[in-house]
Amino acid sequence: MMLMENLRAEYYLACELTLATGRLLTEFRRDKLNIKHKGEINLVTAADRAAEDYLRERLGAERPGDSILGEEGGGDISGERVWVVDPLDGTTNYAHGYPAWCVSIAVMSGGRSVLGAVYDPSHDELFSAQSGRGAWLNGRQLTVSRQVALDQAFITTGFPYDLREHPDEVLAPFNAMVKSTLGVRRPGSAALDLCYVAAGRFDGFWEFGLFPWDTAAAALMVTEAGGRITNREGDDWHPKQKFIAASNGLIHDDFLRIINSSTGGGEK
C-alpha cells in the first residue's frame, strides 16, 4: 500500500512539474532565446538549461533521495529511483516557433519506467501513464490504433543529430517506409511521436540515436495504451538502447521487416 501511495504522489508531482516547466518555456519563447550549437545540427537554448535547472531544483527539494538523469546535466540511470527528465524535447522546433516540442519526465525503478508525464504546451496536452494503470491524455484513457495493414499505416520517425555522418543508414529505412505505408511524417520530437502512437494518431514510430530522456516517459505511454515496443530484432527494448520501434502491435512484424531489410538488420 505504501508503495502505491508513493507512486501516486510521484505521478502527481511529475504531472505538476511538466506543466510548470511548459509554462516556463512558453515564457522564454517571448524573450531572446540565446541559441547555441551542441553539434553541427544540434541546438541548445538558454531555455533548455533554465528548464532543467528548475526541474533539478524542484526534485532536489521534493525527492532528495532520488537520482536525476537529464539531457543537459547528465546523471546516472542505474539508481534505485531515477527521475529521467528532458526539459525540452524538440529544441530545434521550439527555437523556430514550430509547435512540436514538449517536456518529458519519467520515473524509473529497477531499470524500467514506472510512470511518465509528457506535456505539449502548444496544444495544452498532458500525456501521462503509470505502470499497470493505463495511459491518459487530459484525463481520457488512450488506446493504440487498430490498423492491421502496413500499406495503410500512418507512420512517424525522426532523424538523429549525427545524420550527416551516416545518412544512408538513416535514410534507407525512411525511403523504404515511404514506399510501403500510407504516409510517413517527421515532426521532430521523439517523445511526442511516441505519445501519438499511444493515442492512435500514428500507427508506428522508429528512430535511431535516441537517449533515455527521449523515450523513458513516452515509451511507457505506448505499452500502457496496448502497443508494442522492441529493438530491431523484435526483442524487449530498454531505454539505454538507441534504436526504438514502437507500434500498435498489429503491424509490428511487417514494420520491423521493412526497417531491417533496408539496412541489413542488426541492433544499433
Image (spheres, helix red, strand yellow):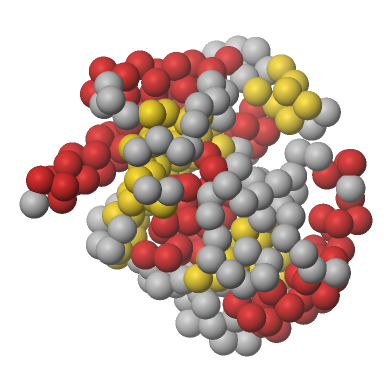
Location of residue 70 with respect to 113 vertically, above or below: above
Residue plotted at (54% across, 66% down): 236
Location of residue 209 with respect to 18 vertically, above or below: below
Given residues 168 and 235, the one toward you in this image is 235
Residue plotted at (46% across, 22% down): 51
- In the rendering, at what x and y percent does residue 171 appear? 85, 58
Residue 17 in which image quadrant = top left
Horizontal side of residue 188 vs 172, given as left or right: left
- In the rendering, at what x and y percent does residue 154 appear? 63, 71
Residue plotted at (49% across, 16% down): 50
Residue plotted at (91% across, 56% down): 168
Location of residue 98 with respect to 138 vertically, above or below: above
The answer to whether residue 158 is visible is no
- In the rendering, at what x and y percent does residue 234 appear? 62, 72
Given residues 218 and 187, the one toward you in this image is 218
Q: Residue furthest bottom?
A: 149
Horizontal side of residue 113 vs 163, given as left or right: left
